Amino acid sequence: MSELGMFADDFVQVNGAAHDVARELGTFADDSAQANDVHDIMVMAQTLRAALAARATEADDHGAFPEEGLREIRNSGLMGLVVDRQYGGMGASFSTMAEVAQILAEGCTSTAMIWAMHCQQVATIADHAGFALRESVLPRIAAGELYIASVTSERNKAGELLTANAPLLRDEDNWIVERDAPVVTGGANADAYLATMRASPEANPSDVVLVFAERAQMNIRLQSGWSAMGMRSTQSAGMSLKGAVPDSHLIVHARGFKHIAVATMVPVGHIAWAATWIGAARGAFRRLLALLRDPARRGSFPLQSELFVTRLARARLGLDTASAFLRQVTATYDRLRSQYGVDSDVFSSPSFNIHINGLKILASEKAFAIVDQLVQLAGLRHGYLKGSDTGLERCFRDLRSASLMYANDKLYVVNGKLSLLDRDVTLI
């Protein structure tokens, strides 16, 4: 019996080891397949980058919404990049989203921002919408049928995300939406909208509800144009929406809108913005290097000057710094989502919010400072004047908006207060 028992024990150990190996091989296969998927996505994004770059100057000159570029993104499947595979999407991580946003931004910052903010709305629906809305909307997003714009701005609200003034009204069967917004990125061209509303006329401004509204359900009226210094192709005009939606189009959470904001809207939004700005700066750096390495033109630049190459090195260091912080914060966000789920309180922690807000601040300041330095290095002809193939003049104007998109001063105040609560000084 003892020999049989020993044999049985050995069999269990060997069999268990075999199962462990099989599990590891299965995990390896999954990781390998995922790596192949990510590689294919990056190749697709690089192809789109070239197409966007070819039209970026003309779109900027005319302040035209990049319809053709967005159509190519729709056809590529990237509108559903962060949609789960069960709905026909690519099921990609937010780290992959950030990489794609950077690549697209090298081609056209405006188009990349339009797409990145769309991904923010998609993630919010995927994370927090009810079953009926997810089932009806996510497959259409994955198919490239829906581009979703964000409607969070309101007059006299100073950009505050966690409050809303316009109240939802109720008729017999539907919720009535009457919403004015001074800035809606790509609003005139959107297929649907995700809007913040006050829960009722009697509710406090902090009692916010998210409303999904399709264009066909709304009467859309443009209230102002978009004649901006930069990001001209985003066509972030003022507009009003008026219409009715069913109960299933309301997105609520048991702990209120603030949890939706801190778990999804803010982190995905800041990652999307930061990736777009860093990508734009990286594209500018690439194009300047091409100019400096061109045998026909590099003689115009003092490449033997220590001051010149030191400034180039500082710009590169800034780019690496911002990129490293983006990668680390995004990887942390992906890990927390996977480990705890989007309903976790971990997203309300002071340290997490310090890092998410810090990413937005760092990326916006660094990206603009880098391009400012590149303009100095390129000089009047290739840095300051329009028409240079470096695209620095356009990139400079685009990135000047970065610190204004939810003003950095406000985020510094928030992070200062949060720092008093993070006693362990938890670093990323």
Image (spheres, helix red, strand yellow):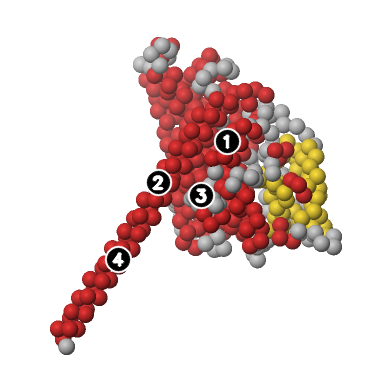
User: Sequence order check: which comes first, mark 3 or mark 2?
Assistant: 2
User: Sequence order check: which comes first, mark 2 or mark 4?
Assistant: 4
Q: Which residue is mark 3?
A: 90
Residue 418: name its quadrant.
bottom right
Callout 2: few (<14), some (14-19), or many (20+) C-alpha neighbours within 10 Å?
A: few
In this rendering, is residue 35 above or below 12? above
Position of residue 392 measured from the top left corner of the image (x, y, whole percent) = 54, 23
| Residue in the picture at 19% in, 83% down | 5
Q: Are marks 3 and 4 in contact (CB under 8 Å)?
A: no
Name the residue type under label 3: Met
Q: Nearer the viewer, mark 1 or mark 4?
A: 1
Q: Which residue is mark 1?
A: 72
Name the residue type under label 4: Asp
Residue 175: name its quadrant.
bottom right
Name the residue type under label 1: Glu
Task: Using the numbered discs, state the Cα–Cα distance from disc 1 to disc 4 in whole angstroms.
Answer: 44 Å
Q: Which residue is mark 4?
A: 20
| Residue in the picture at 48% in, 50% down | 93
Task: Using the numbered discs, state the Cα–Cα distance from disc 2 to disc 1 in whole angstroms.
Answer: 22 Å
Q: Which residue is mark 2?
A: 36
| Residue in the picture at 53% in, 29% down | 51
In this rendering, is residue 193 above or below 289? below
Judge by depth and name the residue closer to the eye, 261 or 108. 108
Task: Using the numbered discs, state the Cα–Cα distance from disc 3 to disc 4 in whole angstroms.
Answer: 29 Å
| SS at circle 2 | helix
